[in-house]
Amino acid sequence: MPIRLDHTVVNSTHRFEGARFLTELLGVSEPEVNGPFAAIRLDNGVTIDYADHFIPADQIQMQHFAYHVSDEEFDAIFARVQERELPYWADPYHKQPQELNNMNGGRGFYVNDPDGHNLEFFTRTH
């Protein structure tokens, strides 16, 4: 059996708020209750489990989550970001606001979720 990531936990001040932010951008089903988590199941079987009980809200550290998406998915996600008038950046350090990047011959950008986690969406891998 090949090794694969099964799930990861995202610390959040409000688990369903954070999870819904991501599901709305991705255009996927609402998060599900999975024990103490708001869980998002991705097409590859990995779940993103949002938790609001592990760490006090003032101690949440920014995490980076990168999502490789098709060109069509990218267009839809980017349209949702623009529709919501969310700030986005071409780079992970947020020095190139309201720009896309063309890393590896594709397109990409970064946006922050409600807890400041850096979400990256891109169309080509390294």
Image (cartoon, rainbow, N blue to C red):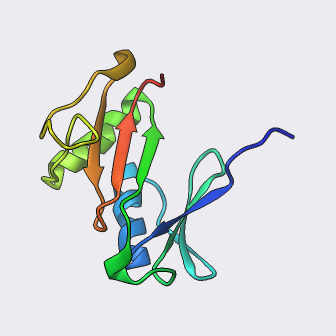
Q: Nearer the viewer, residue 96 or 43?
A: 96
Percent from the top left, x then y, of residue 7? 63, 58
Residue at the image position 26 percent from the left and 41 percent from the top: 78
In screen coordinates, is 23 left or right of 8? left
Q: Is residue 70 above or below residue 62?
A: above
Position of the N terminus, as image quadrant, is top right
Q: Nearer the viewer, residue 39 or 65?
A: 65
Percent from the top left, x then y, of residue 65? 44, 49
In screen coordinates, is 11 left or right of 105? right
In screen coordinates, is 53 left or right of 35? left
In screen coordinates, is 47 left or right of 25? right
Residue at the image position 42 percent from the left and 67 percent from the top: 19
Residue at the image position 44 percent from the left and 30 percent from the top: 70
Q: Is residue 25 above or below residue 30?
A: above
Work out whether residue 82 can be spotted: yes
For residue 109, which quarter of the picture?
top left
For residue 106, which quarter of the picture?
top left
